[in-house]
Image (spheres, rainbow, N blue to C red):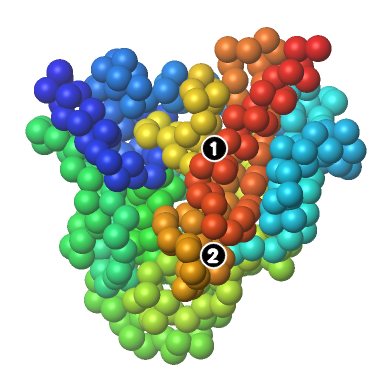
Amino acid sequence: MKKIALLVLALMFQPWAGPAAGYPLDASAETGITRLEAFKMAESILLEQGALKPGSLLPTKEIRLNLKGSGFEIPAPDPDFTAEVRDMLGRDAPAYGISVLDITDPKNPRLAEINGGRSQNPGSVGKIMVLLGWFQALADIYPDDIEARKKVLYDTQVTASDFIIRDSHVVPVWKPGDPKVVRRPIEIGDTANLWTWLDWMASASSNAAASQLISELILLREFGTAYPVSRSEVDAFFQNTSKPELTKKLSAALQTPVTRNDLNVDHLRQGSLFTSEGKRRIPGVSSTSTSSELLRYLVLMEAGKLVDPWSSLEIKKLLYLTDHRIRYGASPALDGSALYFKSGSLYSCRPEKGFVCGKYMGNKYNYLASTAIVETHESKPMLKYIAVVLSNVLRKNSAEVHENFATDLHALIGRFHAR
């Protein structure tokens, strides 16, 4: 056990600092996500060395929906709270779309909103739309049988096909008996169950996993209770279905669930697959988001109204951070907090005298999206708030900007409840 812990620890301190991973560490047997077992075995040493944070260790039973059964409605923006948040942004405020909802006291919530209707490509945050599509389809096919939904997610083995081409994101790969957790890109022929593919998409933010899952979601909707089907049936379906028809099926898989869950598809839409080959095989449309609609997604989830209470809770678990924290989540102020998080970036540079392009520092566009639910169990009262931050601040390291914002916001909300 110690050997595995040390090997996992060494991986987690590699300089590429990959995306943060989700799902509670005690859920390996329930889900078949084997990397959870390895991380659980390594928990104490990872915590000691700082690779895991205290807020990352909640057991499954302590992950709950904060607004379930409350009849909660998002309030109008609070002018004072909004002004305090705006002051944190300074002159860059026009480059942000921000929605912050403080639900520490859910009977007296506070909303700060700045440019809440400002549209921006969500990048990898759009993968939460894939989660919604999956859980909506499972609920449609097995409306009264949650055990059947679990069985599909646990038992279905998916093998990576050319839908994964190309993606450089790495995912954690481990099975009992392996000497170490290996982080590498998904390769054609890799096989894992659906829970693991969902974890690879939501946690490691793998574009390959997202595209493979979208192709499988279309198959699930097509074949219903007969899913999963044979490789020959899969090949025949994609070969015999025209691209315009596949585009319609893609829209039904990813966008219809948005409208069915009382969300505005003009303000929150994942329109395409995430890999070049996936987009070639199934053409899509543009993707967009606003901070106000992303907030509504998370509120519906917390209320148990995203598909249904079971689906809402499972999506929340998939967003729970149990690995290295990045961008907004990297703020030391959040170390003791449970964090439910998704982030996505898109940036581009053009020639500019005196400017050196860098990661998250585009001067043509510099999109970064962060969605975070923060639960600070160590505070009294327990702080609970949702923060959605969309930014296009040019020439600045947006990862650092979001981290600094997270630190300042956490302090602001803490001071309010300490009064």
Give the percent coordinates (x, y) of residue 190: 20, 57
Q: Is residue 14 above or below residue 53?
A: below
Identify which amino acid the numbered label 1 is placed on.
Answer: Glu
> Is 315 situated left or right of 303 in this image?
left
User: What residue is rendered at 22% in x and 51% in y?
Assistant: 184
Q: Residues within 10 Å of mark 2 (few under 14, many from 20)?
A: many
Identify which amino acid the numbered label 2 is placed on.
Answer: Asn
Q: Quadrant of the C terminus?
A: top right
Mark 2 or mark 1: which comes first in sequence?
Answer: 2
User: What residue is rendered at 44% in x and 48% in y?
Assistant: 202
Along the line of sight, which residue is nearer the eye, 259 or 418?
A: 418
Q: Which residue is mark 1?
A: 403
Disc 2 is placed on an element classified as loop
Disc 1 is placed on an element classified as helix
Give the percent coordinates (x, y) of residue 387: 66, 39
Give the percent coordinates (x, y) of residue 358: 42, 57
Residue 267, quarter of the rendered image: bottom right
> Is 391 situated left or right of 280 in this image?
right
Q: Which residue is mark 2?
A: 363
Q: Which is closer to the viewer, label 2 or label 1?
A: 2
Q: Is residue 43 above or below residue 408?
A: above
Q: Is residue 21 above or below residue 92?
A: above
Q: Quadrant of the N terminus?
A: top left
